[in-house]
Amino acid sequence: MRFWPRWFPHPALVVVVVAWGLNFSIIKVILDELEPSVVALVRYVVMLPTMWLWCKVLRIELKYPPGQLWKFLFAGFMANGVYMVFFLEGMETASAAQGAILVATMPIWIALLSIFLKLEKFSAHLAVGILLAFAGAAMTILAEGDGGGGSVLGSVLVLVAAFIWAVSVILMRPLVVEGSPFAVFTLTFPGGALVLLPYGAAATWNTDWSSVTPLVWWFLAYLIFIAGVGAFGAYFKGIAEVGATRTSMTQFFIPPVAALFAWSVFGQALLPMQIVGLVVVVAGSLVASGRVFGGRVTAGRGTLR
């Protein structure tokens, strides 16, 4: 049963947009004191048992289907391991707003991979949308090298991270057919250890934790419990009550929110080219999804962010 009218933004999805929009600025502050590898491993080590505990409290069954363990672990290897490495390494030098804009290209990568793997049919509006979104992404990357507050390399790494997440979504699609999306995401989480343990173990061990400021400790807690476990829970709550299609559209509101927080926290006003790039990325995503021309919008990244 749905408790909210279709025209009204679902409160859970409002939480998601705000939590993930603020997350980019939060990460920038954390990375001023901690290395990306340390942030990745600490986030992972705390999130994993928290997500399992949450599933137990909500009585969500956590059980690997017979013969499917390796598929879950490989999906987690990509989504929770490789993705986080590229994303955090990129965010170390990319600006908060630019990172959010480039992450918004994820549904375009998903659409492209779906066509390549013959999971979806090619269409004109999809082609136009892909071209628009990539043009917008290119604008944001070029703007980084012209005083945009970040580096071109950082932007490229975040863009690669968006592609890697798209691959993980394709891998997870068949896994959620018969199970809860949140349960599937939790079951894939252990696969990330194959990447994050060797990536962050040494740096985490050698970190002088006594020098970490209270603000960064609070922001780490936010990254793990609010933007991590809490936002994921809200996201899947939205899927359950308003559907995957409407839930997936929330990602297009995250870049403006991230830009607003980046401006308020760092004073990073968007350059004209960045603003145009943001508009083009969002427009391209909407066109590719069929939203503009009345086509059917697929769940895309929204099913398993």
Image (tube, rainbow, N blue to C red):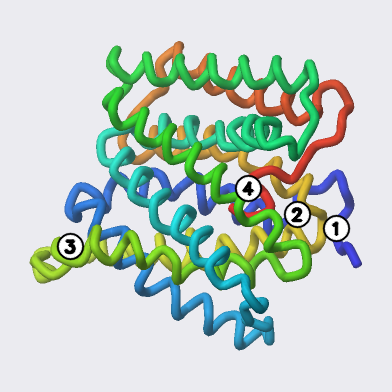
The amino acid marked with disc number 1 is: Trp
Q: Identify the residue position indicated by label 1 in the image.
A: 4
Residue 200 place in picture, x, y as percent: 23, 61
Q: Identify the residue position indicated by label 3 in the image.
A: 213
Marks 3/1: CA–CA distance: 41 Å
| Tag of residue 10 | 2
Q: Earlier in the sequence, mark 2 or mark 4?
A: 2
Q: Are marks 3 and 4 in contact (CB under 8 Å)?
A: no
Say above or below: 168 vs 190.
above
Instruction: Kindly state the secondary structure of the residue where label 3 is placed.
Output: loop
Say above or below: 17 vs 107.
below
Q: Earlier in the sequence, mark 3 or mark 4?
A: 4
Quarter-of-image position of residue 282:
top right
Residue 121 visible within the image:
yes
Q: Earlier in the sequence, mark 3 or mark 1?
A: 1
| Tag of residue 170 | 4
Q: Is residue 257 left or right of residue 44?
A: right
The residue carrying pointer 2 sits among few (fewer than 14), some (14 to 19) or many (20 or more) residues within 10 Å by Cα, namely many
The residue located at (80%, 27%) in the rendering is 290
Marks 3/4: CA–CA distance: 39 Å
The amino acid marked with disc number 2 is: His
Instruction: Kindly state the secondary structure of the residue where label 1 is placed.
Output: loop
The residue carrying pointer 1 sits among few (fewer than 14), some (14 to 19) or many (20 or more) residues within 10 Å by Cα, namely few
The amino acid marked with disc number 3 is: Thr
The amino acid marked with disc number 4 is: Ile
* Label 3 vs label 4, nearer the camera: 4
Viewport quadrant of the N terminus:
bottom right
* Label 2 vs label 4, nearer the camera: 4
